[in-house]
Every structure is written in structure tokens, then in C-alpha cells.
Image: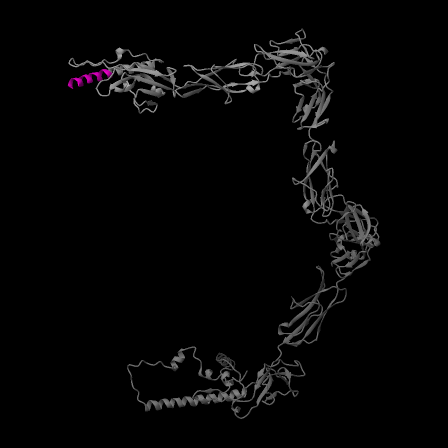
Amino acid sequence: MTQLSSTDSTCAAQWKMWLLQVFSVMYFTALCGAQTVTDVSSSDIPPTSPLPESTTVYNPPVPSLQLKSAWKEIFQSEKVEFTCNIDGSSDWIISLHRNGVKVQESDSNLMFSQDKSVLTITAGTHNAGIYTCTGRHKTRNVSTQPSNSIPLQVHENPSPTLSKSPNFDKMFCGESVTFTCTISVSSGWEYLWYRNGKQINSSTINDYTISSLDLSHNGQYTCITKRSSFGSEVEFSSKESSLQVSEIPVPSLKLITQWPDVFPAESVMMSCEIVERHNWTYTWYRNEKEIQHNSAVSFDKNGATLTVNSASAEHAGQYKCKGHIKGRSVMSILSSGLNLTVYDKKPKPLMTQQPDVGLVYTGESVTYECKVDVSSGWKYHWFKDGSQITNGSSRLDIRNAAVTESGRYRCMASRNQAKYNTEQSDERVLTISVIPVPILKKASIWLDVFPTEDVKLSCGMTINSTNWKYTWYKDGKEIHNDSVVSIDSDTTTLSISHASHSHRGQYSCMGKLKARPVSSSFSSKLTLKVYDKSPKPLMTQQPDVGLVYTGESVTYECKVDVSSGWKYHWFKDGSEILNGSSQFFIHNAAVTESGRYRCMASRNQAKYKTEQSDERVLTISVIPVPSLENVSNWLDVFPTEDVKLSCGMTTNRTHWKYTWYKDGKEFNNDVSFDLDRTNLSISHASHSHRGRYSCMGKLKARPVSSSFSSELTLKVYDTKPNVTLTQTPEHDLMHTGDSVSFYCHVNVSTGWEYLWHKDNSQSLMSGPNPTIVSVATKDSGSYKCQVKRGTTFKSDESRTLKLKVEERPKANIVLLTGWSEVFSTDTLMLKCEVQESQDMWNYTWFKEGQSINASYSEKHAVTPQNDPEQSLYTCQGIRTGRPSYSKPSDSFKTKNLLLKRRVLLSISGCIFFGIIAVFLGCIILRVTRKPVRNTDQPEEPSLFLSMAQLKDRGDAPSPMVDYITDEELNAPAKEEEGNGTICSETTPLTITTPDEAVATENHDKEENNGGLVSFKQ
């Protein structure tokens, strides 16, 4: 067992070496691309291990391996069968080996028989290799030697190659073609033919021929190779091969020279062309007859181009061609025909112009077209003013035309590289002008109008105006028709009816050609002014006076200071008298032409009227006679006196200047005149100035002279006048209050100024008869008078009168009723006496200013019965001598005199007895009552002032004054709490304040030296 194991180990090592050699051979065979594997020599099989010498050698049978297949080279998916035979096979376990490695049953491509002697392989590339088989005895540990080796090649699935002969891209109907399908390995193939995916043939040969092609043979051709083995079948498809079959094309006959109608001597070239890319040659026909090469007709190399070098009438006709392919039996049909016309003479071009006008504006475009109405292929030549300017196109475009492009234009045509020229066309004259600017005019004469007036503006060109239409603008904005503004049909006139403030502005227009898109620039602007209101004419007058004298001329002028085109109308006293002119003349004026004049203006055939002017009142009067007056108020003067005469009209005095006459002669000597000679002044008159004076007036501004004035006679005295002074009444002694009058008399002339003197000083008295109504003592003195006129003449002084004035005596009222009679009577006795007078007087008494008696007594009694009102009394002394009366006395008032006396006496008694009672009471209290001193009680303030304190205080009133007042005396009875009543008399007393009482008292003391006169008012 030990030796057997060693032998087995050695055999295993030898087998490994053999397998390594086999794989190395297969590897290098694969690298070299070998298609077959040579049989493995027996020397390559590892030798069997030598048996031990003690063992009996038994030689096992050698297996026999057979391959059942039609081909030794197979493809994937084909099947082969290996069969291994061993004698007495039932005793052996058979194993198949590939490349020395046992084939495993797990391979899905393998299928073994039950005894493992038959192996069926569905080929895959991994199944290729050298196959052998061995046997191992089922009961003994004996293995056979390897069988013979059979190599098996498995190829990748092949791709048949499909070829076409002839191999043209395009075949034509009628041709033949053969397809060949080639597969590179093995044999036994069946060939299947397909067109466009549908089988069309099958055979065992690899060619497929179509002897006559038609359009149905178009398509994609493929071939499939197929063979079968052990029930399996494999197919391999070639790539598609395209077969394009077309109809034989019809040649295209073209005219190379571009024109089918030519003129004598022109050349013509035609081409025959088949667009297919083949080597075509061409045959030409004219009128169905083949054309042969000659001197006039030539062909190119393959006949594709026919050239007629110099055309003539014999070359006219229909040309055709057909083609055939060199080396192929393909011939086309005839092409369509091409007719060639050969004319007899040269054509003349027709030149047209757009726009077809003779006048073109700068910026416009002009197009000339030159046309030859026969044949074609022309090249055109353009001429301006005889010189060629351009060539080529049949159109000559002048864009954005300029003035310099004006001229005479022609054209001519040529072709065949100018070998053939036509005649020149007729001439066209082109005038290019700058675009005119429209002229804007006022058609209604004025551009400043008034409300409701009509306005018309016109817009137009200076030439060819009808060819234009116009657009209107106001302040730069286009104007359109409305109810007021209208533009006429040809747009040349703009009308504004009833203009208003909204129509103010700057107007302009712009022209546009009716037939062409040509626009002018804007016209100049016209400014339309529409006034806010109707104007009022200004009427002037020459001379500018309200009063005109007969014989004068008057010129009225009526003027409207705005706009123009006015016609004027004149009115007198409301009725129209004249119209037309702006001036109205009155020559040699008469009084009947006086009146109220106005004017008015109108225009536009009186459709528009202004307001009437202000009224001018013309008064025509006869020339007045100047009035001569004596300004100095006297015409009889004394030497050295001044004289002033005035000459003037009753009205409009300042409008005149005057000429003076003395005794009928113009007078200028030794006199002076004012500015207008209105006044004649004589200073220091003398005897030479006596005479008759007159004057005549002349208007300053106009040549108008009056007649002579009436005359004034001037008288000059030789001596001074006498002055007489008298007095009324003629008393030397006067008393104050008397009235005295003086009278100063001059014996001649008038107009005197009186000068009065008192005590040789000038007095304030004036006039000839001054009166001193109430003389005073200051009026005493010496009086005289004097007269003067003007500034230079004075009379001598009058005689002197002396006046003496003494003070008039005054009456005085004395109260005769005494103090002691207060309690015994109610009557007051008054007495009147004239003070400081020794004369005998009578007296008149007055009560409240009215005389109360006629007895002239010096005494008057006043009782409550005859004077209940208690009035004021005065008296006055009267006598028969001078002075005849005295001054009135001062007023004496009797009111409450008696009552006041009684009340005062009563109060005085009460006060006296009250003081005594208080004094006695104080003594009794002091005696009967013992005072208790309380040191803790504060000292009470004294309610009453001591006499010393009263003296120290200046504002302390007198007790009499505090108690004796009019208010207390006149007050009604009052009740006082706890003190009973105080009674008073019902007679009212005068109420006075304490201050008045004191003042009255002091006053009475001053006037009466301390006497008691308090009853006197």
C-alpha cells in the first residue's frame, strides 16, 4: 500500500507537468492565431508509474474517442458529439477531458449519456480545446491510458459579406446587377436572399442576379447563411446593401447665353446636362435633325455645350439633346425643346421715369428704367449729358436727389460682354430743384382782429401751386376743421369765422405734394392777434377847442390805433353825415354847424363796426367883443396914483392876448402890461395919462381878432382931496358902556382906504365910519383919520378930535335886617345905593333879571309870600343927567336866610348846654366811683382826641363845621337807635360839604375882616 501510494504521487506530479505543457502550447497557439491544434504526441502524455517488480502487470485497454460532426470547425450554438469506446466498457467508468482537465457535468452546454461515454456539446467559445477520454475500472484501482486526442475549434458567429456587381451608386432601369454573399469559414451553407426585409430567393450558391432592373428593385438587400447539425440550426445575416434604381434621366437643355432670341452676329451657347454623376456624352438636334460640327457650330469635349459663334437666320429653330453613359448601355430620351429666335435688326430701348415728372425736388428719389422689349440678358448703360455714368442694371436710381443731378438722361443696352449694343433710348430731361417753401399770406388784409371778425389766410407755392396740398399749424400744432375754423378743399385757404381769444397765436403751413411723398419745410409764421374787446376810435379836433368862432376852419380826425383797413363814419347830433375818410373838415364855420360830433370805424364791407368815439361838442360862436374894465375901481385919480385897466373876454379870457388904444391910437408908452397884455398898469399917473382907453383881442393860437371894446375915460386931478372928521354924539366926556361913532369924509372920487390914528399911533379902526359900541377908559385919547388908494397915494390928515372916558358908577345892595331881629320877623329888607357918587339917583329893582317895580325906590322888602322861590335880586341907579344910569349891582340871593339863622342859633345853644352837661357828669362820676386798677388789663385806646391832639392834626375838622352843614339841616328826620328822634323844619336849606363850609367861612372872613356875614350869598 505504501509503494502504491508513492507511485500514485509520482504519477500525479507527471500529469501536472503534462497539463502545464498542453496549456502552454494552447496559449502560444492562441497568440499566433492558429486555427487547428495538432495532435498531442504520445511522448507528451505522462508516463505511467512503474509498477513494483513484485506486482503482476496488467495492461488495460486504450480508449477510442470519436467525433460525430459534419464539420471540424463549428460556430457557437452548433452541436457536436464525442463518443468514448473501451473494450468491456461495462466494467469501466469513462471520463472525458478537455485540455487534460476532466469535463464537469455542471456546464450547461454539455449533455452526457447515462454511462458517460457520449458527450453532446452545444458549442460555445469556452468549449474549444483538445478532447481525450480515459477509463477507470469499476472494481479495481486501474485506469486506462488516455484515448486519442481530437481538437475542437469553436469560432465566433461569422458575418457574411454582401457585394454588388457592378457596384454603381445608382442603377438605371434595364441594367443588370449581381449580388454575391461570401462567408469566410467552413461550408455547407444555404443562402437566403431578402429585399426590404422580405425573402425573395434561396439557393446553395452565393450569387443572386437581376438581369433587367426596374423601379421595383429599389431597396435594401441582405443575405442570410444557414446550416443544420444534430437537429440545431444556425443563421448568420450580412449587412444591408442598397440598390437604387432610377428612371433614365431626361437631359436638361439650358441656354448659357441667357437669351433665346438673338440678333445677327451674336453668339449663342446652350448646354445639355444630366444631373446624375455619370460620364455622360451628348448628341444635339435642331428641328429633329442631328447637328454636326462645322465652322458656325462647335461642341465641347463630351458634347455637353453647343456654341453658335455667329448667329444667322439658318440657326433659328428648336434645339434638343440626349445623353448616354460611356461604358454602360444607358441612353436617355430627348430633352425638351429650346427655341432660338434670330431677329432681323437692332432694338431700341424704352426708357421710363418714376415719378414721371420733369421737375423733381431735392431729397426725392428718381428711378429710371431702361427696357428692351425683345430678348433678354441685356446689360444697360446710362448716359447723362452725353457722358456715360454707369452701366449694368436696367434701373438707374437717384436717391436723395441733389440739384447737381439735373440733366439729360439716355440709356443703351448691350449683351455678350458688350459685343452687341442696341441703339440709345430717347432723351429724358430731369430738373431737380430745392423744395420750395410755401408762402403764407393774409387774405383778409389784417392780422389783428376783434371778436366776431373773420380772418382768412392763404398758403401756396410760387409755382405749380395746384400740385400741392397744405397742412395748417397754430403754435406748432396741426389745425383741423371745426365749427369756426375751416380749411377749403384744396387746403390753400384757412378761414376763421367769428374770431375769439382762443384763435390767437402763430400760424404756419407746410406743403405736401399730392402725388409724391414730398413735404416742404414750414412757411414763415404769421401772428394772429385777437383783441379782447371792440376798439373805440379816438376822435381829435384841430383846433382842439370846444369854442370855435365863425369863419374859422375845424378839422376832425378819427383814428383807431389798432389794426388797419378801417373805413370811417361821421355823425352829427346822432345822424350820420359822412363816411369814408378818417378826416372831416368844416371850412368857414357858421353857427349852424355847432353840434355833437362822433365817429365810428368799420371794415370788411361794414361787417365789423367799432364802438362810437367819445362825443365832441362843437360850439361855433360869433367873435366876442372884449370887455374893458377899471381894475383899480376908479377912473378919476390924483397925481402919483396907480391906475389899472383890464381888457378881457367874458369866457376863455386866457386864450386871448390884447392890443391897447388911447384916443384911437395904439398905446404902449409910459405904461406896463402883464403877460397877455390883459391888464394895463399906470404907476404915478400924470396929466399926460388923461384920455379915452379901448382894447382889441387876438386869439393866441389862431388868427382870430375881435372888434374894439367900449371906451373908458381916465381923469387925473390936479390937487389932493379934502378929508373931514366928525364924532357922534359930540360929547367930550363919555362913560364906560357908552357908544361913540366917528365919520371920515373925502370930498371926491371913490375906492379909498381909511387910516385911523389914536394919540399919533395907528389904530385898529377901519372904514369911513367906525363905531365903539361900549367905550372903556382905555378909549380916551386924540383921534384923526387919513385916506389912501393904491400903494403910493395918501391924503393929508384930518383935524384932531379928543375923547375922554370915565368909569361908570356901580349900584350895591345892602341887607338892612339885623341879627337881633332873627326871632322877631320873616321879612328881609334890601337897600340899593350907587357907590362913590354924589348925584341924586332913582333905582330900578330886578328879580331874576326882570324889573319888579316902577317906584324907583332905593329899598325893597323880600318875604316868603312875595318870594316863595327865593330868587336872585339886582338893582341899578338911573337919573336924568349924565351918566344916565349906573352899573347893575351884584346879585343878592335870599334863599333860606331866615331858616339858616334860626337853625344856627339852635345848634349853637344845644352844643353849649351839651358841653356843660358832659362836664358836670364827668365830675359826678369821678367823685362817686373809685377806680380799680387792673395791672393785667391792657390800656384801652382813647376814643376821643385831646385838644392838644386836635391841634396837632391838621385834618381834624371844626366841630361846628362837622355839625352845621347844609346836608344835615336839609335832611329829613331820622330815627336813631336808642336816642329818640331829631326834628327839623320842612324848609329846605342849601346843602354844602364840610370843605365848602370852611371855604365859605374863610372867604367871608377875608371879605368882611372877620365879621359874621355867613348869610350872604
Give the quarter of the figure containing the N terminus. Answer: top left
Task: Please state the horizontal and vertical placement of residue 187, each as a whole percent of the image.
Answer: 42, 14
Query: In the image shown, does 660 or 346 lie closer to the viewer?
Result: 346
Residue ID at (75%, 55%): 681
Rendered view: 253 above or below 293: below
Q: Quick check: 335 left or right of 598?
A: left
Residue ID at (30%, 87%): 931
Query: In the image shown, does 527 or 556 lie closer to the viewer?
Result: 527
Q: Is residue 694 visible?
A: yes
Rendered view: 655 above or below 473: below
Query: In the image shown, does 681 or 268 lie closer to the viewer?
Result: 268
Hey, which quadrant is residue 801 in on the image? bottom right
Give the quarter of the figure containing the C terminus. Answer: bottom right
Q: Is residue 542 visible?
A: no
How many badges with numbers are in the image?
A: 0
Does the magenta-highlighted stretch encompass residue 11?
A: yes
Q: Quick check: 81 left or right of 807?
A: left
Task: Please state the horizontal and vertical placement of residue 601, each as a whole percent of the image.
Answer: 77, 48
Task: Please state the horizontal and vertical placement of residue 290, each as a whole percent of the image.
Answer: 67, 10
- Identity of the residue furthest to the top in this view: 295
Does the magenta-highlighted stretch encompass residue 57?
A: no
Q: Quick check: 844 left or right of 88?
A: right
Task: Please state the horizontal and vertical placement of residue 273, each as a whole percent of the image.
Answer: 61, 15
Query: In the image shown, does 779 or 815 lie closer to the viewer?
Result: 815
What secondary structure characterizes most of the magenta part?
helix
Rendered view: 758 above or below 383: below
Residue range highlighted in magenta: 1-16
Q: Quick check: 443 left or right of 959?
A: right
